[in-house]
Image: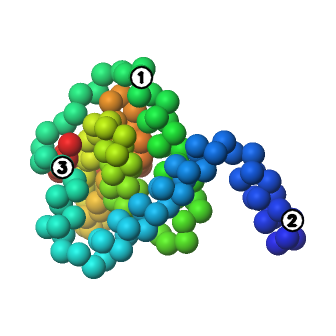
Amino acid sequence: MLIKKLARKYKTFVQVPLHTKWLFIEALYTSAWVKLSLCFFPFKRVMAWLGTVNIETINTPDVQTLNTRMQVKKALELCNKYALWPTECYTLSLTGKLLLKRRHIGSTLYIGFKKDNSMYKGHAWLRAKDTYITGFKQSIGFTIHSRFS
């Protein structure tokens, strides 16, 4: 059973285009770096990666970067699914922001909070142009606290 499952995953991985494989590997390494940085560096140092506070990038459609944005989104979905470490919303959003920054595509990272049964919950999501890259579906009910572009 396990061998069949691994064989199927290998077959799927072989069929994926080379560019997507490299982007997935880049997303995994960047996600691991972000996760370790969040654990060991002071938050002030990580804040520098977020960008300018309370400024949003434009959200108009851009056909030239649409393919790249969708590839980054797919790579982050794969990273979330196959990473050996937990990839919470904040880790994925920050990873996506760094991947997009390397490709010179502006993005806005949102941090929101909501009160649920007298407990506060936080959530982060990422938007590049008119595309939500990570976490938008789960952002319903959260009030935006900060924006970083």
Task: Name which residue type carries label 1.
Answer: Gln
Kindly report the distance in space between the C-alpha atoms of the residues bearing marks 1 and 2.
40 Å
Q: Residue at x 51, y 39 (%)?
A: 71
- Residue for badge 3: 51
Q: Of tags 1 and 2, which is closer to the observer?
A: 1
Residue 97: % across, % down: 33, 48
Q: Is residue 129 above or below residue 86?
A: above
Q: Is residue 93 above or below residue 86?
A: above
The answer to whether residue 77 is seen in the rendering is no
Most foreground residue, 28 or 111:
28
Q: Quadrant of residue 120?
A: bottom left
Q: Residue at x 64, y 45 (%)?
A: 18
Which badge, 3 or 2, comes first in the chain's sequence? Answer: 2
Q: Is residue 25 above or below residue 144?
A: below
The answer to whether residue 117 is seen in the rendering is yes
Q: Residue at x 40, y 32 (%)?
A: 131
Residue 115: % across, % down: 25, 59
Q: Secondary structure at mark 2?
A: helix
Task: Name which residue type carries label 2.
Answer: Lys
Q: Residue at x 29, y 60 (%)?
A: 122
Q: Secondary structure at mark 1?
A: helix
- Residue for badge 1: 64
Kindly report the distance in space between the C-alpha atoms of the residues bearing marks 3 and 1.
23 Å
Numbered tag placed on residue 4 in the rendering: 2
Task: Name which residue type carries label 3.
Answer: Gly
Q: Secondary structure at mark 3?
A: loop
The answer to the question of whether label 3 and label 2 lie on touching residues, with beta carbons closer than 8 A, is no
The answer to the question of whether label 3 and label 1 lie on touching residues, with beta carbons closer than 8 A, is no
Query: How many residues crowd around disc 1 within 10 Å: few (fewer than 14), some, or many (20 or more)?
Result: few
Residue 127: % across, % down: 33, 39
Which badge, 3 or 1, comes first in the chain's sequence? Answer: 3
